[in-house]
Image (cartoon, rainbow, N blue to C red):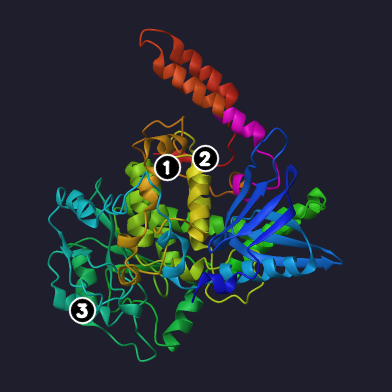
Amino acid sequence: MEFAELIKTAKVENVQLSYSGLPPIKGTLCITSHHLLLSSQPGGNGEQGTVELWLLIRNVDAVEKRVASSLGTITLKCKDLKVLQLEIPGMEECLNIASSTEALSSVDSVMMMYPFFYRPQSMKLKDGWQLYPLQYFYEQIASETGAWRLSCANGDFTICSSYPPAVIVPATVDDNILKKAARFRQGGRFPVLSYYHKKNGTVMLRSSQPLIGPNRKRCQEDEVLLSAALDGGGRGFIIDTRSAQAAKQARMMGGGTEPTSSYPRWKRLHRPLERGRPLQESFIKLVEACNDTSLSMDRWLSKLESSKWLAHVKGALSAACLTAQCMEREEACVLVHGAEGTDTTLLVTALAQVILDPDCRTLAGFQGLLEREWIEAGHPFHFRYAHSAYSHARLKQEAPIFLLFLDCVWQLGRQFPFSLQFSERLLLVLFEHTYASCYGTFLCNSEKERRLCKVKEKTHSLWAWLNQPSERKKHLNPLYAYNALVIWPSVEPQSLQLWQGLFLRWIRSSQYLDEAWAEIQRLVTSCEDAPEESSGCTLCHSQLDAAYPLTIAGTANEG
């Protein structure tokens, strides 16, 4: 397929661009294989036009057109929730631009996407891809205990197509046991180490559901694997992200849960979390409510509640807190799984690590966590984020699980404003690049697919761009102070808030908030530059209190 075949009209003059908060701009609209460009018309005195719009077409979620006589209007609803309007002279030109944009935004071939064509001069293709290798994570664990080893049994992806080539497993379990245990788990996702809690030596594992089935099948190798994870003693908890009823129904379909008779040292706890269509529909309803500015406050709050988005946030944080509590306070090992083990399982394991581990709350540690627990762990990004909240296409496998994770991390940052080294801006960037990106980091559904598409050889890494000094500084939290304690968030209704910086981003101006953060950054910088013996730091903290008034209801605490 050639992109030129999809472009019916490449250039239109006198197009007017409108979007919330800014005056209309008239200029020349050009459409390329991957971008919509609008260059404003030049003024007098030989002035050149300015590029006012540079939109990645992959970011377009829905195209709506309206034609009246000689003028057509196209509304572009984007995956980052922005809404743009183009007024185009000429019916044929309007229909052609709309048709071309729809066709280009629907290209599903990974290797035809923009990351395979993007070549910034300041970066090399190899940069960023090896920043957070699993080998480094394993070496940190190996320095604490010899109970775990790095297995490369899945090097050719034949044991589990959604796992990376290397995984961390109990040292006493050989690769033959892993292969047999994999046949007893959906998709071959046998239990692997997700996190080692250095404070007390407990571990968090993740997997998919066991294939117990209606005949209550057993797998000795799977039982040996989970027993070995307890290191000969202690007990463990299985956090199942399905309801007990859903798990029971799954058993009739060939899945199920670990029976106590076969796994006597493991206690099962159910913490049901929505995924798939219910979560996607919740996201759609929330965005609809946020975009409807005609609603009264009571009606708007009612629609916000009926979307159930904050209920999903509460559920995810509660499940992660339970997992962290089992490890930190009960000093027990934990296995987390749902059905496939690629969605809510990763949501819980990743959130629990942010709660437990101060290293995961640094900028580098958070990036490593995303690489390890989402990207390499096999979260199907290509399937889940093909469409956002506006698409008219029939839902297939879309579900904003990763967005829910980012929202939960934002809630943690709001309740503990000094404990996260990165700012809200980083979370917004991650949200944008999940749905449409010029980098290859979130392409494909698994490491196997990335290797087949040669993503790491032919595209740039998002981490390489984010870690450039000029960009890194933009995404740091100026209030950050290293906090070695566990952060326990409150999930009371008054403690959880709508993430306005994302969901109201294009609707309500953030000018005053941006100015407040700029002032905080200035105060922190001046404090850092002040001599140690001066009283500047005391003054700075009092000024920060004025610039950043924080009132958090509920019972969030550290300890």
Q: Secondary structure at mark 2?
A: helix
Residue underneath mark 2:
415
What amino acid does circle 3 point to? Lys
Give the residue type that dot 2 points to: Gln
Q: Is residue 176 visible?
A: yes
Q: Is residue 32 left or right of residue 437?
A: right
Q: Residues within 10 Å of mark 1 (few under 14, many from 20)?
A: many
Query: According to the image, label 1 marks what residue?
Result: 487
User: Mark 1 is on which residue type?
Assistant: Ile
Left or right: residue 1 versus residue 450 is right
In magenta, the rendered stretch is: 501-517
Instruction: Name the foreground residue: 44 vs 154.
Output: 44
Q: CA distance from mark 3 to mark 1?
A: 38 Å
Q: With 446 as the anchor, is 138 left or right in this view? A: left
In the rendered image, residue 437, in percent from the top left (x then y), is placed at: 48, 57
Q: Nearer the viewer, residue 151 or 355?
A: 151
Q: Are marks 1 and 2 in contact (CB under 8 Å)?
A: yes
